Amino acid sequence: MAWDRLLAEIFAGDLVTDTPYNTYTRAGLPLTPIAMPGLAAIEAALQPANTEELYFVAKGDGSHQFSKSLEEHNRAVAKYQK
């Protein structure tokens, strides 16, 4: 499957196509994981950065806005997601 297809929107037809990984058409969990974290993600979880930012929101351009407080985060959500 091509990356552009993986990053595409989910269409109505995708929800009814019976595949081993379609949890809309199959009961229970898929046979194998549907995604695997990369080494960098595992290392980041084991040794998180020392930072005061507790929240983040996607800006919609591939980047993120990090915030130290819930109030700051809510403002960022209002700016970038609404």
Image (cartoon, rainbow, N blue to C red):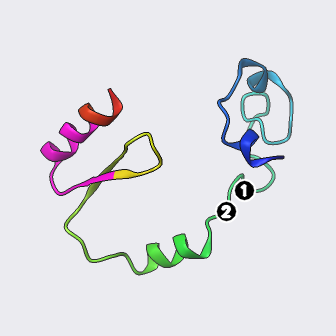
Disc number lying in front (2 or 1): 2
Q: Residue 44 vs residue 52: left or right? A: right
Q: Residue 31 vs residue 47: left or right? A: right
Alpha carbons under labels 2 and 1: distance apart: 7 Å
Residue that badge 1 annotates: 33
Indicate the amino acid at tag 1.
Answer: Pro
Q: Which residues are magenta?
A: 65-77
Quarter of the figure that contains the C terminus: top left
The rendered magenta stretch, by its main secondary structure, is classed as helix
Q: Residue furthest top?
A: 12
Query: SS class of the residue under badge 1?
Result: loop
Residue 12: percent from the left, percent from the top? 72, 18
What number is the disc on residue 48? none
Residue 66 part of the magenta segment: yes
Q: Is residue 47 above or below residue 16?
A: below
> Is 28 in front, or is 62?
62
Q: Residue furthest front?
A: 61
Question: Label 2 neighbourhood size at 10 Å, few (<14), some (14-19), many (20+)?
Answer: few
Q: Quadrant of residue 32?
A: bottom right
| Residue pictured at 45% horizontal, 43% vertical | 61
Indicate the amino acid at tag 2.
Answer: Met
| Residue pictured at 24% horizontal, 71% vertical | 51
Query: SS class of the residue under badge 2?
Result: loop
Mark 2 vs 1: CB contact within 8 A = yes
Residue 60: percent from the left, percent from the top? 43, 39
Q: Is residue 12 above or below residue 18?
A: above
Question: Label 1 neighbourhood size at 10 Å, few (<14), some (14-19), many (20+)?
Answer: few
Residue that badge 2 annotates: 36
